[in-house]
Amino acid sequence: MRRPISRTISRRKRTAARRCTAPLAALVAAATLPLGTAAPAAADSVVVGGQPVQAADSPWVVALSSRDRFGGTRAGQFCGGVVVAPTKVVTAAHCLGPSVLGTDSKELTDLKVIAGRTELRDSGGVEVAVTGAWISPEYDPATQAGDLAMITLESPLPHGHVIQAARAGDPAYRAGTRAAVYGWGDTTGSGSYAYALRAAQVRVLDDAVCARAYPAESGGGYLPAVMLCAGDPAGGRDACQGDSGGPLVARGKLIGLVSWGSGCGEADAPGVYTRVSAVLPEQP
Ligand code: 4AZ
């Protein structure tokens, strides 16, 4: 059986602790974090078929961390994020929801952004506290439409960390464009979470290909207005669990956020990404 939304087959099967009851609305209403209380859960992690990269060479990639909830072995990393302004990080909305954080998701007291750190066991880079989170009003947890959240940092990161987001119509979105996805997620599809940042080279795929891979059906399907898909036609290169919220970059610009997919790196099951140009509000 293959269902179109990996949230039902990969993200959610990861841990029962993620199946939770806290309404996302509560999180949205709490425009200002703190979120969460301590409860162990597996990290939402991977890049399959990638290679190691240095945070210094891709300084806009950050890790979202909660040691309270995910433990300290990998610095509490549970999702990726992208710096779009000195105090603003975008990530997947689902990263701040119950499917990732578990129950009591509205009160995570130790949510941090880790920037400039390649290896999660090192102490390099900076850890910045989070003062607020905005969930896109377009986010629909049932379909993953609008899977984007914006986090406000307590103190600014240097301008060198910021990546520009591609606007609608940018050639970076064209099918066939080479792109790279970054993260500390599962490198195998079977729960081998990376300690060091990795990137995989993929290509932006045609909407028709994405729609064929994930036909509309009850509960999900590919929605080209708010999603794009990317992969390696032969499989093998993809984002995976734990990479969610991390960047898909093409032509030096942010085009997508890791959102969902069926498994990781399987042929004819490309990774699906939030179409940033459609969901991110215009930057000032
Ligand atoms: C996940 O569960 C997930 N292969 C993220 C990305 C993909 C699959 C699953 C894409 O977070």
Image (spheres, grey):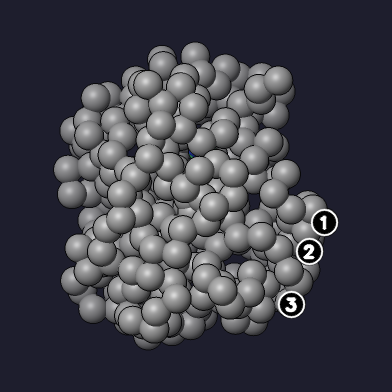
The image quarter containing residue 233 is: top left
157 lies above or below 40: below
Estimate the spatial distance between the alpha carbons at disc 3 and disc 2, rounded to whole Å: 9 Å
Near-viewer residue (108 or 66): 66
Q: Looking at the picture, which amino acid does disc 1 mark?
A: Thr
Residue drawn at (22%, 69%) of the image: 56
Q: Looking at the picture, which amino acid does disc 3 mark?
A: Thr
Does residue 259 appear in the picture of this structure?
A: no
Q: Are marks 3 and 2 in contact (CB under 8 Å)?
A: no
The residue carrying mark 3 is: 37
Estimate the spatial distance between the alpha carbons at disc 2 and disc 1, rounded to whole Å: 6 Å
Q: Looking at the picture, which amino acid does disc 2 mark?
A: Thr
> Judging from the image, what secondary structure is the residue with disc 1 in?
loop
Ligand 1 rendered quadrant:
top right
The residue carrying mark 1 is: 21
* Image quadrant occupied by the C terminus: bottom left
Residue drawn at (64%, 40%) of the image: 10
Residue drawn at (31%, 30%) of the image: 204
